[in-house]
């Protein structure tokens, strides 16, 4: 017995393309440039934050000095060295301002009254809008009902118009006087149209 053995084909050799040295160097240069820009931006932010911190320390020292806290704090802040001059903070009196101003009270009352009137007008406007929308829906329903009624009426008129020639054709065959034909005509017409007995 001679059986042939088939071997699997060899695995393909994959060759990955590597970027050229010039391209690699250009990519590295671009990354270095971006990192340098980011580092410079972080340095600017740090310096801005330091200046802001020093100004806040000066303001805090002014507040504490105005309250009669330790004057040593003002000395420490002054030793930090800042560009902003130290100003003295004066605390306002504890009395509420404008408490005795009648004009201000009157203006506030007018403002509150105008606000109440405005809210009332908004309520009326909302009610009017609801009523108008309900009325519009009722008119639409009435319009649809009238259109349906007109359609039914047109159908009946068409039936009557179709039945009149038939009645005229049957009229000479039936005997009787002209007066009986005239008085019986509507009943005969109704009988032929609606199929009832007249």
Image (spheres, rainbow, N blue to C red):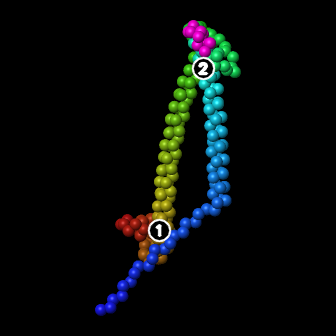
Where 53 falls versus 161 (above or below)? above
The crowd level at tag 2 (other Cα within 10 Å; few <14, some 14-19, many 20+) is some
Q: Nearer the viewer, mark 1 or mark 2?
A: 2
Residue visible at 60% across and 15% down? Answer: 76
- Judged by its main secondary structure, the magenta piece is helix
Q: Position of residue 121 (x, y in %)?
A: 55, 29
The residues tagged by marks 1 and 2 sit, at their Cα atoms, a distance apart of 101 Å
> The residue tagged with tag 2: helix, strand or loop?
helix
Q: Is residue 168 visible?
A: no
> For this rendering, which residue is in front, 22 or 160?
22
Residue interval drawn in magenta: 65-76
Residue 70: within the magenta? Answer: yes
Q: Is residue 149 visible?
A: yes
Q: Earlier in the sequence, mark 1 or mark 2?
A: 2
Image quadrant containing the N terminus: bottom left
Which residue is disc 2 drawn over? 57
Q: Position of residue 81 (x, y in %)?
A: 66, 19
Residue 37: within the magenta? Answer: no
> For this rendering, which residue is in front, 99 or 184?
99
Where 28 falls versus 8 (above or below)? above
Image quadrant containing the C terminus: bottom left
Where 50 falls versus 158 (above or below)? above
For this orientation, the residue located farthest to the left is: 1
Residue visible at 63% across and 42% down? Answer: 38
Which residue is disc 1 drawn over? 159
Residue 22 tag number: none
> The residue tagged with tag 1: helix, strand or loop?
helix
Q: Position of residue 159 (x, y in %)?
A: 47, 68
The crowd level at tag 1 (other Cα within 10 Å; few <14, some 14-19, many 20+) is some
Residue visible at 62% across and 22% down? Answer: 54
Residue visible at 38% across and 68% down? Answer: 195
């Amino acid at each position: 017995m001679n059986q042939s053995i088939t071997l699997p084909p060899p695995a393909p050799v994959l060759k990955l393309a590597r970027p050229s040295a010039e391209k690699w160097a250009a990519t590295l240069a671009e990354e270095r440039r971006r990192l340098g820009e980011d580092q410079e931006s972080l340095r600017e932010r740090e310096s801005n934050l330091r200046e802001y911190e020093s100004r806040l320390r000066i303001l805090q020292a002014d507040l504490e000095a105005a309250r009669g806290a330790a004057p040593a704090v003002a000395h420490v802040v002054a030793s930090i060295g800042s560009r902003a001059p130290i100003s003295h903070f004066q605390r306002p009196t504890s009395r509420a301002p404008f408490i005795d101003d009648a004009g201000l009270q009157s203006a506030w009352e007018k403002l509150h009254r105008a606000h109440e009137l405005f809210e009332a007008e908004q309520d009326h406007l909302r009610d009017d809008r609801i009523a108008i929308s309900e009325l519009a829906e009722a008119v639409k329903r009435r319009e649809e009902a009238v259109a349906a009624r007109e359609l039914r009426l047109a159908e009946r008129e068409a039936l009557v118009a179709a039945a009149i020639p038939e009645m005229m054709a049957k009229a000479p065959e039936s005997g009787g006087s002209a007066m009986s034909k005239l008085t019986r005509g509507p009943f005969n017409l109704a009988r032929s149209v609606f199929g009832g007995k007249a």
